[in-house]
Image (spheres, rainbow, N blue to C red):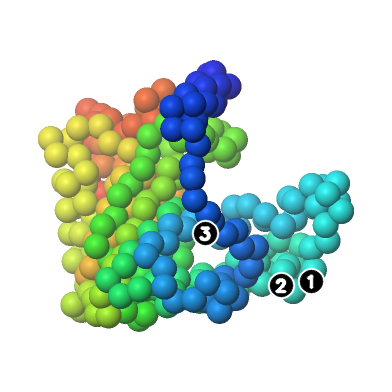
Amino acid sequence: MNVIEGKEEVLKQKRVWKTTEGWCGSFRAYCLDIAALPDAIGRKVDYIFTDPPYGGHIAYLDLSILWNHWLGFEVPLPSLESEIIVGGELRLTEEHYIQRLSESVRLCVEMLKADRWLSIVFQHWNTRYFEAILEEAAESGATLKTAVTQVGDTIWSMHKKKNKDKVLSGEMILSFIKDGKGQRPSGPVSSKRALDELIEEALLEVSPDRRPFAGESLFNKIILKAWNRGALHSLDVSREEFSEVLTRKGWRYDALQHRWFSARDGVESGFQLTL
C-alpha cells in the first residue's frame, strides 16, 4: 500500500510540475551545526519548521556510515560529539541531549525576526525533553500559541507495530511566536490530587462521552496541561503504566483501528505521578 501511495504522490508532483513549469527563484542549502547557523544566515528568519531527533530513537550519523563510505565522505569526530541524540557510537548521555536540544531551541528563536514563528515537531515518553523545549522557548522570549497532535496515516516503525498500545506514533507540532514575552505557567501544582484531576480533565477533553481516541492525543494533552500548571517536571508516566492505567479505567486498545475504546465494567484508577 505504501508503494502505491508513493507512486501516486510522485505522479501528483509530476502533474504540478507540468502545470506550473516548476518553481522559479533561488535558495541556499546549508550543512552546518545549529550553533553555526545564526552567523551564516543572520537573524532575519520569518519562519522555522524543525523536526529534531527524538532522544535515542535513531543514531543518524551511525546509520549513515555506509552511505558516507560509498560517497567518499568522512564524519569528523566533532560532528559525532555534537550530535543531538542519546547513545550512538560515543554513547552520548541524556544530559548531553537535553543541553543540546535546549541550545537548539534558543538559537532558533534567536534567528527569528520579532513576531515571527517557530514550529517544533516532537514526540517522546520522556517529559524532560518536552520540558527542555518549552522552558527554553519561554526563556528565549517565545510564547507557545498552538499545539497540534498528528496521529493520521503515519509510517510506523517495527517497534510500534510490535507494541501498538505502548509505543507513541505521530507527532505533536508545537508552534511559538517570538513576542519577547515568553509566557510561562502561573505556578506549580502542589498536590498529587491536583495532578490526578489534571489527568481526568485530559480524558474528558480528548474523549467526551467516552468516544474512541488515540493514545497519543491523550498523552500530548496531559503534557500540555502539566506544563500550563507548572507540573511538567513532576510528571512521570511510563509507556507500560500508561497502557495499564487506561485498561484499569475501562478502556481497551483496538489494534486494527489504533484507538482506545470504552470497555464494559471498567474500574477507575489513577496515574502514579512523582512529585
Along the line of sight, which residue is nearer the eye, 72 or 254?
72
Secondary structure under badge 3?
Answer: loop
Instruction: Give the label on residue 52, or none.
Output: 3
Residue 132 horizontal/vertical position (percent): 43, 71
Q: Can the viewer see residue 70? A: yes
| Crowd rating for badge 2 (residues with CA inside 10 Å; few <14, some 14–19, many 20+) | some
Residue at image mark 2: 81
Q: Quadrant of the C terminus?
A: bottom left
Nearest to the observer: residue 234 or residue 128: 128
Q: Amino acid at mark 1?
A: Leu
| Residue at x 37%, y 65% (from the top left corner) | 46
Neighbour tally class for label 3: few under 14, some 14-19, many 20 plus, Cα within 10 Å: some
1 or 3: tag closer to the N-terminus: 3
Give left or right: position of 66 versus 96: right
Distance, label 2 to label 3, CA atoms, is: 16 Å
Distance, label 2 to label 1, CA atoms, is 6 Å
Q: Which residue is mark 1?
A: 77
In the image, 161: left or right of 141?
right
Q: Secondary structure at mark 1?
A: helix
- The image quarter containing residue 210 is top left
The amino acid beneath tag 2 is Glu
Q: Residue at x 43, y 37 (%)?
A: 165
Asked whether 150 or 251 is in front, the reply is 150
Disc 2 secondary structure class: helix
Q: How many marks?
A: 3
Q: Give me the residue at 31% from left, 34% from top.
A: 260
Q: Residue at x 71, y 72 (%)?
A: 81
Q: Is residue 86 visible?
A: no
Q: Is residue 57 above or below residue 31?
A: above
Q: Is residue 259 left or right of residue 128?
A: left
